[in-house]
Image: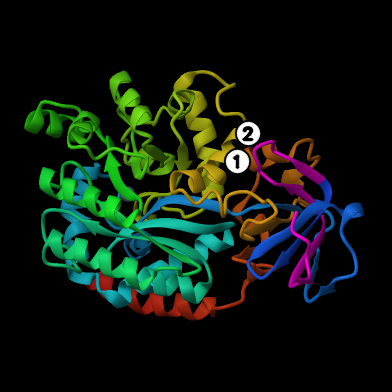
Amino acid sequence: MVEPQNIDLAITGAHILTIDRDMTEYKQGTVYISGNRIVWIGPDDQQPAGFLIRDKIDATGKILMPTFFNGHNHATMSIFKGLGNDLSLDSWLNDFIWPAEHKLVNPETVYLGTMLSAIEMVRSGTSIFSDMYFFEDQVARACEDIGMRGIIGEAVFDFPSPSRATPQESLQYIRELNEQFKDHPLINVAVAVHAPYTCSPDIIKLSKELSDELNIPVNIHLCETLAEIAMIAERYQKTPVQYLYDLGFLSSRAVAHHSVHLTPEDIKMLKDTGTSVVTLPNSNMKLASGACAVSKLMSAGITVALGTDGPASNNNQSVIRELQQLARLERVTNLDPSVLPAPELVRIATINGAKAYHLDDEIGSLECGKKADIQIINPDQPHWYPLFDPYTCIAYAMHSEDVETVIIDGKIVMRNRVLVNIDEQRVLRQMKKRISMINRH
Ligand SMILES: [Zn+2]
């Protein structure tokens, strides 16, 4: 264990859920943070003494746990929240979202839309999200301003995007982003190849090659709807998973979002290649896409993480709400109340996201030496009482607003429900101005 010298922040008295391998808990515990790392964690009565402590939080009676990991998002799309409801994915994208994006998406709207989503995420205990959109340098700018982490994935598909004229230009831009944000404390870069039905085999192969060359993750929407399954079957006489497998795309760097409609052979290919899955239950329910067989995939040995998807197809950015919906969806689709027990759900929302993106050595659980990404939750409220088991309360009863304080990379980003780096009301005022523009669309 690292011996702390100067402690930048000490949090004491909390019921700590570490979410480490053994799911260690400290009923009254302390965390010492030095710089951006946890340098000591353990029971209050064993805390090392005699160090200079710069800032202290008395978290007596509070729950302290890792922040949530939002495994898939299009954060900018908060600007389209409420446009074109009650439609199939196909019609929603073709008739509303894609035309609106080409008119309205520019660096400033990406920044503003991401800020709005990022505020909602931090306020519900999320410290990191994996994004797939355009002008991703502006997503990074929003993350830096608010103080949260982002995995920025510039979207690639066959047709021109709002930010780049060709897929080759988008891939080149990802290369530049990777150079720009190399060694950045908060930003990671990923390739984000949109989907098998929007990308030619060549573009999928080039995306995979870039991910290999830069050693960064590659995201893809996969097996989201039955319409996609039919389209790929018609074009290639294969399932989308088989199609990607035959292109050599699937690997431990690949993260497949949705993965709703899978055959047993598909599941085996995902497992054998080390591909991770991000499930997005609210989006799948809202768009009537189906339900990902999460416990079946996990039993097969696939890492399954959790995400919100974009704000326009959810319409919420809270991972707490997402994990609560996942719990219910998984039970009702299996007609089995024993699937995905509460501690497993909390792991899916924290450490599994870090595993899917190969960040689990640094974040996803509270352990000595790891980066300090921590949320402090206030359970002193009727919906938590009598608090027999904190995991059950998180999985079924917790509200997003119960998150009181959020620490990211060792720094307090929200203290007692106040975001410390930005003026939240100012962002809301700017968004109101934009609404009139969207209404004119
Ligand atoms: Zn998506």
Q: Does residue 283 lie above or below 301 as drawn?
A: below
Horizontal side of residue 115 vs 338, given as left or right:
left
* Residue closer to the observer: 31 or 128: 31
Screen quadrant of the C terminus: bottom left
Residue at left offset 64%, top offset 67%: 410
Q: What residue type is labelled 1?
A: Val
The stretch of residues the image draws in magenta is: 1-26
Q: Does residue 31 lie above or below 437 as drawn?
A: above
Horizontal side of residue 197 vs 251, given as left or right:
left
Figure disc tally:
2
Distance from the alpha carbon under mark 1 to that under mark 2:
6 Å
Horizontal side of residue 434 vs 128, given as left or right:
left
Name the residue carrying label 2: 342
* Residue closer to the observer: 383 or 175: 175
Residue at left offset 76%, top offset 42%: 25
Provide residue 243's location: percent of width, then percent of height.
18, 32
Provide residue 149's location: percent of width, then percent of height.
49, 63
Provide residue 28's location: percent of width, then percent of height.
85, 50
> SS of the residue at dot 1?
helix
Residue at left offset 24%, top offset 69%: 105
Q: Which amino acid does label 2 sit on?
A: Ala
Residue at left offset 61%, top offset 76%: 420
Which quadrant of the figure has residue 386?
Answer: top right
- Contact between marks 1 and 2 (CB within 8 A): the answer is yes
Name the residue carrying label 1: 346
> SS of the residue at dot 2?
helix
The numbered mark at residue 269 is none
Is the residue at mark 1 in contact range of ligand 1, meaning its CB lies under 8 Å from it?
A: no
Determine crowd level at label 1: few under 14, some 14-19, many 20+ residues with C-alpha closer than 10 A: many
- For the question of whether residue 405 can be seen, the reply is no
